Amino acid sequence: MFFNKNSIQYLLKFIISFCILYYGTLAMIGFASPGGYYSPFIHNYLDYVSWLRFALLYISKLLLSFFGYKTFINGIYVLRMQGGYGVHLVYSCIGFGVMSFWIAFIFANQVRWQKKVKWVIAGVLSIFLINVIRICLLLVAVNRKWSNIFNLDNHTLFNIAAYLLIFTMIYLFDRSERKHSINEE
C-alpha cells in the first residue's frame, strides 16, 4: 500500500496546519482592514501582516541605503526611490503563503519542539531575506529600466526562488534528521 498510517497522519497534519496558517492569515487581513468584519482590536494589536510589510519595507530601505540608493517609505505600502519610481507592497507580496508552507512542513514532522522552533525561525528568516532582496532588486530594476527575466513577473520569480529555497531547506532538514537517526542507532 502506498500510504501507511504515519504518512497519512503526516499529510493530514501538514494540510490542516497549512490551511490554518494560510487562511487564518487571510482572515486576519480581513479583520484588520476597515469595512466588512473589521475589528479594531485585531487592527491595533494583532495585525502581524502589517508589521511584516513594514519590516520588509524598512529593511529593504536600509539595504538599499547601504548600497548608496536614496529611498523613502511613502505611506504604508510603497518604497520609493528619490526622484524615481516605487514598489507597492500589497498583501500578495508579503510571502505569507510560502511561509505558511514552510511552517506547516516543519510542524508536520515528528521532531523535538526545540528543533522545530529552530528550523521554523531559520526558514521564515530565509524567506523574509529573499523577499527583501527581491524588493530591492525590483526597485532598482524599475528605476534603471531593466527588462524582465524570461518575461516573468516579480511574483513568479519570487515564488520560484522561495520554493527552490524551501526545497533546499527540506533537503537539509531531512538530511539532518537522517544523520540524527543514524547517530541514535
Image (cartoon, helix red, strand yellow):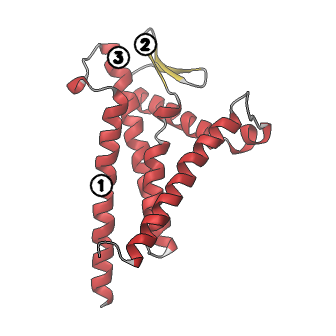
Q: Residue at x 49, y 65 (%)?
A: 13
Identify the residue under disc 1. Answer: 167
Q: Nearer the viewer, mark 2 or mark 1?
A: 1
Secondary structure of the residue carrying numbered label 3: helix
Task: Categorize mark 3 by other alpha carbons within 10 Å: few (<14), some (14-19), many (20+).
Answer: some
State the quadrant of the N terminus.
bottom left
Identify the residue under disc 3. Answer: 142
Secondary structure of the residue carrying numbered label 1: helix
Whether tag 2 and tag 3 are in contact, CB under 8 A, the answer is: yes
Task: Give amino acid for label 1.
Answer: Phe
Reading the chain from its start, which is encountered first: label 2 or label 1?
Answer: 2
Where is residue 115 drawn, in percent x and y?
45, 70
Reading the chain from its start, which is encountered first: label 3 or label 1?
Answer: 3
Identify the residue under disc 2. Answer: 85
Task: Categorize mark 1 by other alpha carbons within 10 Å: few (<14), some (14-19), many (20+).
Answer: few
Reading the chain from its start, which is encountered first: label 2 or label 3?
Answer: 2
Secondary structure of the residue carrying numbered label 2: loop
Can residue 68 be seen from the camera position used here?
A: no
Where is residue 25 drawn, in percent x and y?
59, 45
Q: Residue at x 31, y 34 (%)?
A: 157
Q: Quadrant of residue 74?
A: top right
Q: Nearer the viewer, mark 3 or mark 1?
A: 1
Task: Give amino acid for label 2.
Answer: Tyr
Instruction: Return the residue nearer the eye: 97 or 74.
Output: 97
Q: Residue at x 26, y 17 (%)?
A: 146
Task: Give amino acid for label 3.
Answer: Val
**In this picture, is 115 found above or below 91?**
below
Furthest residue in direction front, as rendered: 1
Can residue 70 be seen from the camera position used here?
A: yes
Q: Residue at x 75, y 38 (%)?
A: 44
Instruction: Return the residue nearer the eye: 12 or 42.
Output: 12
State the quadrant of the C terminus.
bottom left
